[in-house]
Image (cartoon, rainbow, N blue to C red):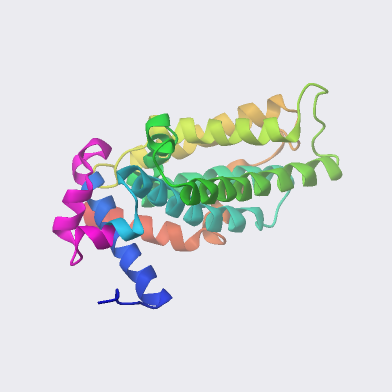
Amino acid sequence: MSPKLIDDATREAREAEILQTALDVIAREGVSGLTIDKVVTKVPYSKGTVYNHFSCKEDLLTALCNNCVRRLADIFFRAAAFEGSSREKMLAIGIAYMLHSQLNPTEFMLVLSAKTPSVTEKSSQKRQDEHQELETKLLGKLLGIISDGLAHGELTLAPHLSPAQVSFSLWAMSFGTIALLQENLERCGVRQEMSLERELINHSNLVLDGLNWTPYTLDHDWHESVQRMKDTVFAPEVAKIQALVDAAS
């Protein structure tokens, strides 16, 4: 008997269900606790069907990471559309990353696992190519803001720095700040949430002042800018976070 053919919509829905199940396993047991067998016991599909979608656990991890980057790309693009100076847009990228991490804490930390050699060496070339394409898209948005700053005279790069180096440094700074200060929403109150936001703004301003990116910290009300970001481009995320905080209190 020939295998049953499924349409693209059904295949995508099945794959999304498998990915969500894997994410639930990781949320409970950590990355080391994830196995294909555990996923199979929790979905209405055979092991062979799961393997038709994902060649191994590492391929599944890379797919989860790619989903995270897709969601991040959406909020990064909205951040870049914020009505303000190029420096405000760059800060908006950091705030977008923070909000994304608070709504998707498990996926946020999966980026580290997905980049380890033990994962990259085993995941499929298709997933790896997809990951590279998505990351290039994200960095391209940062590069666009840097180019805008250079074009408007708000930023002048030192001779030893390239836009790509600056964009990577700012991304790394944001990730590190969030990773070190992040709290699970179930355990965090307003105080901890605001601590992360405050330090992210402080660290961003420290780096951007060092790059001579105007307006400088003391010449602008950055907290007012962040509030405008929350009220406009990030209103859906802010509402979701507030609902989770209210439900946990």
Residue at horizontal 62 percent and vertical 27 percent from the top: 206
* Left or right position of 191 against 227: left
Q: What is the chief secondary structure element of the magenta stretch? A: helix
The front one of 144 and 180 is 144
Is 36 one of the magenta-colored residues?
yes
Q: Where is residue 19 in the image (x, y as percent from the top left)?
A: 32, 57
Q: In this view, does 216 lie above or below 124?
A: above
Say if residue 19 shows up in the picture. no
Q: Where is residue 9 in the image (x, y as percent from the top left)?
A: 40, 76
* Left or right position of 112 against 219: left
* Left or right position of 131 against 137: left
- Residue 216: which quarter of the image? top right
Q: Is residue 205 above or below residue 18?
A: above
Residue at horizontal 49 percent and vertical 47 percent from the top: 125
The front one of 78 and 12 is 12
Q: What stretch is highlighted in magenta?
A: 28-50
Q: Quadrant of the N terminus?
A: bottom left
The front one of 14 and 3 is 3
